[in-house]
Image (cartoon, rainbow, N blue to C red):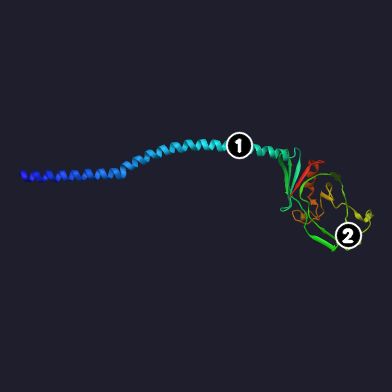
Amino acid sequence: MNTMQKYLGLILFVIVLIMGILFFVAGNLFLIPTAQYSSYESKLKKITDTDTIKISEKELNNLNKKVELLSRKIDRFTPGNAFLIVNTTENSFRLIKNNQEIRKGLCSTGSFIQFEVDSTKSWTFETPKGALSVKGKITNPIWRKPDWAFIEEGLPVPVYNHSSRYERGVLGDYALSLGDGYLIHGTLFQRFIGQPVTHGCIRLNDADLEAVYNNLQVGSKVFIY
């Protein structure tokens, strides 16, 4: 009996010892690292959140300063009154007044066709690009036909002030001069608005032309790109 009790006691001791060892190993392998990870993660999150807030505020302040600086630069370059923006790639325009777009639509610009008569005389029908300005405003404009208009029609070129050079009713009700013979004007062929078909002038339909004419003044900027 005593011998049996000794064996049972020994077996229980071995079982308890093995369980203790397993628990110790499991604790070292899983429980303790998990607890440490949770602790480190909590500390890291706290540090990261604090640094992120500081970095974000710093970056936000820098961005606000840059935006303010750029806004000032834009204000210096932006005309205070109405101005026109013409996109020759898309054949479109935007009319801006008080920094607000008040009208937009299609227009026609230069075809970029090169018309060569001989080795000494040629024209490229391109709308000039850059920051231009309105040089003059005209109601019921009369087109003074240039030399190329006669050559295109196979007609002899008349003298400078010949009456055949002047043609009424083909430029619409209004025209705005950009200098060097380039105009913003209307057209009899409004179905072609939105296409690059002009000899360099900017054509608008009747309603858009009237709005542009009424809002732009002599000296107003016309930005063409």
Q: Is residue 13 left or right of residue 185?
A: left
Identity, as a three-letter code, of the amino acid under mark 1: Asn
Q: Quadrant of residue 74?
A: top right
Q: In the picture provided, is 70 more to the left or to the right than 194?
A: left
Sequence-first tag of 2 and 1: 1
Which quadrant: the N terminus? Answer: top left
Residue located beneath label 2 in the image: 150
Q: How many marks?
A: 2
> Where does residue 13 sit, x and y in percent of width and height?
15, 43
Packing grade of label 2 (10 A; few <14, some 14-19, many >=20) is some
State the residue at coordinates (15%, 44%): 12
Q: Amino acid at mark 2?
A: Phe
Q: Is residue 77 above or below residue 163?
A: above
- Residue 76, label in figure: none
Instruction: Report the front residue among 84 and 171.
Output: 84
Alpha-carbon span between mark 2 and mark 1: 59 Å
SS label for mark 1: helix
Q: Disc 1 marks which residue? A: 64
162 with respect to 152 (left or right): right
Which is more foreground, mark 2 or mark 1?
Answer: 1
